[in-house]
Image (cartoon, rainbow, N blue to C red):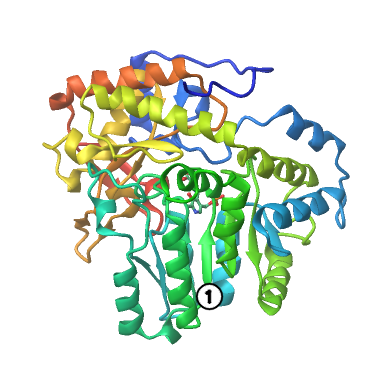
């Protein structure tokens, strides 16, 4: 029997339902980019699981109670206690969100001409490496690109590729090796403890620091418990501790498994690097005990870190993702299998085989889903991760997926049933859906600002 919601609803927000004609006009006016819509014009918003969590009464309560101070608020010490308790780290730098952590850390570590290997970079991580003159390199196992193939730990780093890469480039050109848990870019796919351990060994052998991009650490830990031999009887908090024990540091967005609407941090073991990141943090984020946020946000994070590691919560959470994936799978909709921790990814290349990647099939599908049903997903494909050559031609990403990210504790199964029925209705009339032509493309982070028109 599945665990139902381990909470009950105390406050609700009204949803707005526009007509299809109204939605079509809104999206056309915004160049077919769903990021540019007003959220009140969206019925069910699966754009992201980041910063969209419904917070608990305990989090809100702690926010009211906290001291608001420039320096030394009690909320900072509560986060410190949670970070030590949950991650086993004593040193950390508070920042307002994950990408600020990436900016500060890479400013210290990455120089022009360096390479940063990762299983797979998320867009902001990739953007921040590029911004410091480095080259982000994705070394995930090949199975990650085979959307239909069922693999337990599809987020794993390819160990042979990593060894070869270090031999080729030389360890002095590699200031850090990262692992993103879970691998958001290719489906929210988990990384096994064995893989974390192996990456750590290789990093140690070459004296390269090893960091986690730990946004969805609790969801990753849950998959280790469920799928990896030897962890069935280990608690989530013990699994999390072990995962982090291999790392010299981590970047973290509290907007995901921090169960908060804002916040992030860099965890560090090295004293000097901690000092340098703290000092840079003061210039660009704020004094270390508030890190660019109101102290109440820190109070929410301190509570949220414990809430995301409760096994009954994770069972419900991953159960929701499985429920949505199950309805879609039954109707034959091509998915990234198995579904990951925070979202269902639909393979738009298999959904719309008549649309070539150069015409952004996942963006086209995302647009149709909004226009017809008011559901907002997001493209993770050629718009987000593709490139453009010197003649302006589109170089496709290795995949074109539409992600339906599930905000934490926000939607009911009935909402997800509506989402499934909407996608299935589109699947039934898929031959009528046409591709898009990009009319504007920024230099970096394409999917936020690009604009399109129908082909
Ligand atoms: N790393 C990963 C793996 C992420 O998924 C994100 C954000 C970040 C870093 C950056 O964190 O947003 O707090 O600055 N992902 C969101 C998403 C935006 O929708 O997947 P941030």
Asked if one can make out residue 24 in the rendered structure from this viewpoint, the answer is: no
Compared to residue 236, the image places residue 276 above or below, namely: below
Residue 84 vs residue 438, the one in the foreground: 84
Residue 309 vs residue 376, the one in the foreground: 309
What is the crowding at mark 1: few (fewer than 14 residues within 10 Å), some, or many (at least 20)?
some
Location of the C terminus by quadrant is: top left
| In the displayed structure image, the side of residue 141 where residue 79 appears, left or right | right
| In the displayed structure image, the side of residue 316 where residue 433 appears, left or right | left
Compared to residue 283, the image places residue 375 above or below, namely: above
Numbered disc 1: secondary structure: loop
Residue 152 vs residue 185, the one in the foreground: 152
Quarter of the view holding residue 102: bottom right
Give the residue at mark 1. Answer: 209
The mark tally for this picture is 1
Asked if one can make out residue 389 in the rendered structure from this viewpoint, the answer is: yes
* Residue at x 14%, y 44% (from the top left corner): 356
| In the displayed structure image, the side of residue 287 where residue 258 appears, left or right | left
* Residue at x 59%, y 55% (from the top left corner): 252
Q: Position of residue 76 (x, y in %)?
A: 80, 53
* Residue at x 77%, y 43% (from the top left corner): 299
| In the displayed structure image, the side of residue 332 where residue 117 appears, left or right | right
Compared to residue 210, the image places residue 431 above or below, namely: above
* Residue at x 42%, y 50% (from the top left corner): 229
Compared to residue 187, the image places residue 445 above or below, namely: below
Q: Position of residue 441 (x, y in %)?
A: 33, 52
Q: Position of residue 11 (x, y in %)?
A: 67, 18
Q: Position of residue 57 (x, y in %)?
A: 74, 27
Residue 353 vs residue 174, the one in the foreground: 174
């Amino acid at each position: 029997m599945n665990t139902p919601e381990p909470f009950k609803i105390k406050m609700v927000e009204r949803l707005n339902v526009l007509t299809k004609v109204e939605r079509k006009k809104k999206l056309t006016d915004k160049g077919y980019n769903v990021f540019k819509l007003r959220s009140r014009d969206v019925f069910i918003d699966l754009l992201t699981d980041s910063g969209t969590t419904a917070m608990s009464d305990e989090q809100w309560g702690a926010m009211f109670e906290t001291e608001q101070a420039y320096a030394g608020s009690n909320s900072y010490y509560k986060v410190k206690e949670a970070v030590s308790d949950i991650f086993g780290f004593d040193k950390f730098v508070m920042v307002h969100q994950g990408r600020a952590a990436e900016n500060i850390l890479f400013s210290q570590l990455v120089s022009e001409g360096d390479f940063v290997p990762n299983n797979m970079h998320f867009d902001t991580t990739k953007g921040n490496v590029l911004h410091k003159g480095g080259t982000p390199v994705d070394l995930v196992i090949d199975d990650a690109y085979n959307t239909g193939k069922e693999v337990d730990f599809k987020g794993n780093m390819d160990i042979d590729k990593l060894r070869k890469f270090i031999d080729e480039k030389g360890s002095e050109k590699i200031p850090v090796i990262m692992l993103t848990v879970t691998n958001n870019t290719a489906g929210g796919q988990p990384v096994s403890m064995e893989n974390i351990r192996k990456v750590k060994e290789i990093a140690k052998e070459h004296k390269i620091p090893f960091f986690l991009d730990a946004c969805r650490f609790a969801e990753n830990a849950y998959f280790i418990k469920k799928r990896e031999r030897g962890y069935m009887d280990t608690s989530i908090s013990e699994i999390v501790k072990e995962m982090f024990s291999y790392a010299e540091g981590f970047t973290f967005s509290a907007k995901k498994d921090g169960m908060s609407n804002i916040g992030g941090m860099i965890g560090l073991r090295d004293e000097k690097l901690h000092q340098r990141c703290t000092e840079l943090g003061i210039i660009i984020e704020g004094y270390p005990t508030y890190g660019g946020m109101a102290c109440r946000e820190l109070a929410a994070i301190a509570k949220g870190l414990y809430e995301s590691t409760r096994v009954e919560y994770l069972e419900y959470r991953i159960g929701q993702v499985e429920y949505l994936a199950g309805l879609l799978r039954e109707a034959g909709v091509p998915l990234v299998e198995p579904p990951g921790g925070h979202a269902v990814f639909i393979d738009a290349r298999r959904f719309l085989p008549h649309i070539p990647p150069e015409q952004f099939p996942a963006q086209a599908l995302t647009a149709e889903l909004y226009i017809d049903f008011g559901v907002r997903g997001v493209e993770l494909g050629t718009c987000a991760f593709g490139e453009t050559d010197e003649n302006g031609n589109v170089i496709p990403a290795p995949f074109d997926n539409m992600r339906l990210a599930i905000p934490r504790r926000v939607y009911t199964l009935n909402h997800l049933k509506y989402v499934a029925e909407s996608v299935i209705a589109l699947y039934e009339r898929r031959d009528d859906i046409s591709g898009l032509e990009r009319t504007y493309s920024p230099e970096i982070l394409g999917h936020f600002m690009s604009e399109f028109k129908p082909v």
